[in-house]
Structures are given as structure tokens and as C-alpha cells.
Image (cartoon, grey):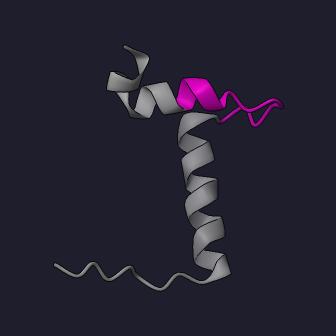
Amino acid sequence: MIFKAPYLTYRDIGKYAEDFLAKHHPALELPIPIEGILEFLNPLAAR
């Protein structure tokens, strides 16, 4: 099975990143809680 990834421009990637941060860390304060976001996205990782 061949997986073909979509072509994304830098603008597309920036938009995805902005949307992701707006949803998961809207305060945009530093430091960004990466561990908390990853645990939220993958509940099995917390076990």
C-alpha cells in the first residue's frame, strides 16, 4: 500500500499550526505545555 502525502505550502502549514494552537493553547503564553497537549491528543500515552 502506498501512502501519498498531500502537498502543503508554508502558508498551509502556518494555518494548520495557528488553528492547532488556537484550539489547544489559546492563551499563547510561553512555555507552551507540549506534554499536556500530547497527552490530551493521545490518552494512551498517559498510562
Closest to the observer, 18 or 40:
40
Closest to the observer, 45 or 40:
45
Picture coordinates of residue 2, whole percent (x, y): 23, 82
Is residue 40 a member of the stretch shown in magenta?
Answer: no
The magenta-colored residue range is 26-37
Furthest residue toward left? 1
Is residue 33 a member of the stretch shown in magenta?
Answer: yes
Query: Going 40% across and 24% down the picture, which residue do you hit?
Result: 45
Picture coordinates of residue 13, whole percent (x, y): 60, 70
Picture coordinates of residue 27, whole percent (x, y): 72, 31
Closest to the observer, 15 or 8:
8
In which image quadrant can residue 46 be found?
A: top left
Above-or-below relation of 38 to 5: above
Above-or-below relation of 14 to 34: below
Furthest residue toward top? 47
Prevailing secondary structure class for the magenta stretch in the rendered image: loop
From the viewer's perspective, tell me whether residue 39 is left or right of residue 30. Answer: left
Query: Going 61% across and 57% down the picture, which residue do you hit?
Result: 17
Above-or-below relation of 17 to 47: below
Furthest residue toward right? 30
In which image quadrant can residue 35 be found?
A: top right
The number of discs equals 0
The quadrant in which the C terminus is found is top left
Query: Going 75% across and 37% down the picture, which residue do you hit?
Result: 28
Query: Going 81% across and 29% down the picture, which residue do you hit?
Result: 31
From the viewer's perspective, tell me whether residue 9 is left or right of residue 5. Answer: right
The quadrant in which the N terminus is found is bottom left
Picture coordinates of residue 22, whole percent (x, y): 60, 44
